[in-house]
Every structure is written in C-alpha cells, then in structure tokens.
Amino acid sequence: MRMRKRMRMNASMKLILNVLLLAAIAAATGCSAAPTNSPAAMNNSTNSTMKFPVQKSEAEWKKELTPEQYAVLREAATERPFTGKYWDTKEPGVYRCAACGAVLFTSKDKFDSGCGWPSFSDLAAKGTVIERKDDSYGMHRTEVLCAHCGSHLGHVFDDGPAPTGLRYCINSASIDLVPATNAPAEKTEEKK
C-alpha cells in the first residue's frame, strides 16, 4: 500500500514539474519566438513591395553580416535570453542597426526589463522603425523592422515604463552600440 502511494506521489510530482517547466519555458520565450514572416521569407512579398532606402540581395547580406546577425536580421531568428552582448549594457551612446548603420535607439531610453534582451522605451527618432503585425506561434505581437533596410530587430510590447509605456525588446545581434564619446550628435527630429 505504501509503495503504491509513493508511486502515485512520484507520478504527481513529475506531472507538476513538467507543467512548471513548460510554464517557465513559455514565460522565458515571451519575446523570443521568431516570426514566420521574416524578411528573408517575405522577400517575394512584403519586402519586395516595401521599398527601403538600403536595398541589397540576400547574398550581399550574407557576405556582410556574421552568421548570427544574418539569422536574426534577415531570417528573424532570436538569440537566447541573457546571452546577447547588450542585454545588460549601461554604457551611454546610440544603438545603430547592425545591417545598415541607421540610428535606432539611445542609451537614455534603455532600461532593464528583466526579459534578457536589450529593452528600450522609445526610438531615437520618429520613423526609424516599421511595426508589423506578427501572429506567429499562436501569439499576437508587433514585430519591429529597421525602416532603412527592412531587417528584423525584435518586437515591441505595451508593458514598458512611462511616459511611452512601450518596451522595444531588441536582439543584441541586430544592433551596434556607438559609445557616447564616438556617437554623432543625436537627431532632434520629433519622436513618435
């Protein structure tokens, strides 16, 4: 009798642990699942109908970007949380698109969201990104693309700090930090 009770308890514990593990994985991937509408996959539709100032073939992008950058920027892959080079960076400066060099974000809008990816509450200037509906993996999200080259950067969520209430959850592989000592003067364009 004791043995059966112990076996039922072990089975229950295993079930509970599996459910907790799945919940932890789902929570950790809150902004990490890659969309099925990646720039590379959309080349024949969205990206060919949308004209970006920077136009290159996928072969040219592959030649210019590291394999990780290509996977993120052109195929909408996502780096693992807490592994990118900028997720916990506090250095002042501007963040540029790693594909085309467009200024996207500034360190003054960077904050620690706890999600494991660099998070920004605002854009460096209005019009630097394009937002696109992303319903991949059964989730309703908003994908963020560089407005200059169409590269995938990450996603934007409405759970950020005031005053914008936004959290741009961005892959480190999609951006390059230019430290404040080397950064060009910030544009004074009106923000969104």
Image: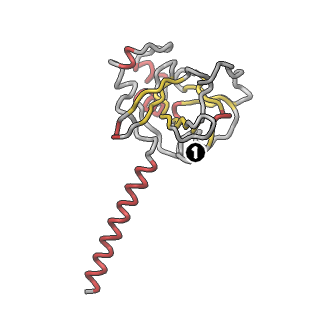
Q: Residue at x 55, y 25 (%)?
A: 97
Q: For the point 74% across and 28% down, which residue is it?
A: 181
Check the image and tell me how it is coloured: secondary structure
Residue type at numbered disc 1: Ser
What is the x, y in percent for residue 174? 52, 31
Instruction: Give the quadrant of the C terminus.
Output: top right
Is residue 18 shown left or right of residue 115?
left
Question: Can you say whether 60 is above or below 35 in the image?
Answer: above
Q: Residue furthest right?
A: 181
Is residue 159 placed above or below 39 in the rendered structure? below
Is 149 on the left or on the right of 102, as rendered?
left
Percent of width and height locating residue 9: 32, 75
x and y, in percent, of residue 109 in the image: 64, 34
Element assignment for label 1 = loop
Q: Nearer the viewer, residue 61 or 183?
A: 183
Residue sitting at x 35%, y 23%: 42
Task: Classify mark 1: residues with Cα within 10 Å, few (<14), some (14-19) or many (20+).
Answer: some
Instruction: Give 123 or 174, whichever is nearer the viewer.
Output: 123
Q: Position of residue 32 (x, y in %)?
A: 44, 41
Q: Quadrant of the N terminus?
A: bottom left
Seen at 56% across and 30% down, the residue is: 175
Nearest the eye: 189 or 61: 189
Dividing the picture into quadrants, the one containing residue 57 is top left
How many marks the image carries: the answer is: 1
Q: In the displayed structure, would residue 166 be above or below residue 146?
A: below
Q: Looking at this rendering, what residue extends furthest in the bottom direction?
A: 1
Q: From the image, tell me which residue sits under label 1.
A: 113
Question: Foreground: 1 or 135?
Answer: 135
